[in-house]
Image (cartoon, rainbow, N blue to C red):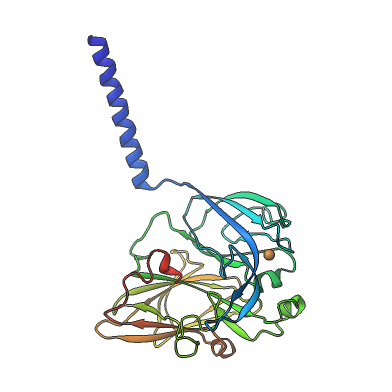
Amino acid sequence: MNLVYITKKSTLMVAAFMCLALLLTSSIGYAKTVKVKMTAMEKDIAIDTKGTMYPAWTFNGTIPGPVVRVTQGDTVEFTLTNDKKNGQSHAMDFHAAQVDVLDEFAPVKPGETKKFSFTTKYPGVFMYHCGAPNMAQHIARGMFGVIIVDPKEGYSKSYPKPDREYILIQSQYFPNAGDAVAMMENRGWTNSLINGKIFHYDPLHGANAPAPLVAKPGERVRFFFVNANINMPVAFHPIAGIWDRVYLNGNPKNVIYGMATYNVAVSEAVTVDLVTPKGKSTNNAIVDHTMSAALRGAITVLITSPDADDSMGRGDKILP
Ligand SMILES: [Cu+2]
């Protein structure tokens, strides 16, 4: 009787210990494995708010591809399926990975699937894209996206928690989708796309009054920006504002302050904070100050007012 009691008691203690250990590990946020699956899809999609169709090549049928968000130290277990209906080989190149370009990033034929894993060593914001030849054409036709690696330390004084977050990915639009050499040589592009559409969030220029981005006065609005152009840097500037902070490559350790314009190289990604003025409603136009790009589509309107929709810039509406 006593022995049974002791056994029960020690079992209970072991169980309690295990619960405690589980609680501790989950609250500290130990590295985890995140499964990410994408399918390369060649399909026609609209590249403006008027519904102009374009024979795109995509990850999962959208430009940009799905947002991947993990925490520094996590392992991404990635699977790429190349739909058997496709005409092209496709591949995946995550700029957040340290692997072998000839192995993990190698092309996958139509009807085949490839898996690889990588551990996210550095925090920040990183482009991903298809790396199959001709790479200029695969990126120009839409095979790119963003992976955000949140710092394992979380937010801090030097990397404050933002009130809202938005992803903006800029790319070049080449209507002649078949001319890979022109794309490589920067000939024949007619427009800039923001998150896959010309003047995506600009009701002044875009057709059908697309919805602008919103915030409230005095908020810290964080933008994760990716330059997915083929050949042109981006002069990233918030008209009527100043970037409070620019985190190069999105890494909290790489911070610079008070930048009017930050030059973003091709394939570079950057995290920038805009702190909106307190006490009044304002508007910003977030642009590529390179005029040939701004006036051809790279303008995003941010409207700041007290009645801003609370769901915007949060959850899955960081890429609305
Ligand atoms: Cu591709």
Q: Measured from the top left, where is residue 112 in percent x and y?
A: 70, 52
Question: Based on the displayed image, in which of its 4 quarters is residue 307 positioned?
Answer: bottom left
User: As drawn, which residue projects farthest toward the top?
Assistant: 1
Q: Position of residue 261 (x, y in %)?
A: 48, 83
Q: Residue at horizontal 27%, vertical 19%? A: 8
Residue in view at x 53 percent, y 70 percent: 269
- The image quadrant that residue 245 belongs to is bottom left
Locate residue 127 relative to residue 304 in the image: left or right.
Answer: right
Q: Quadrant of ligand 1?
A: bottom right
In percent of width and height, residue 179 lies at 75, 78
Left or right: where 285 falls relative to 40: left
Query: Quadrant location of the C terminus?
Result: bottom left
Q: Position of residue 308 (x, y in %)?
A: 31, 77
Q: Is residue 17 above or below residue 230?
A: above
Residue at (70%, 85%) from the top-left corner?
A: 188
120 is higher (above) or lower (below) than 168: above
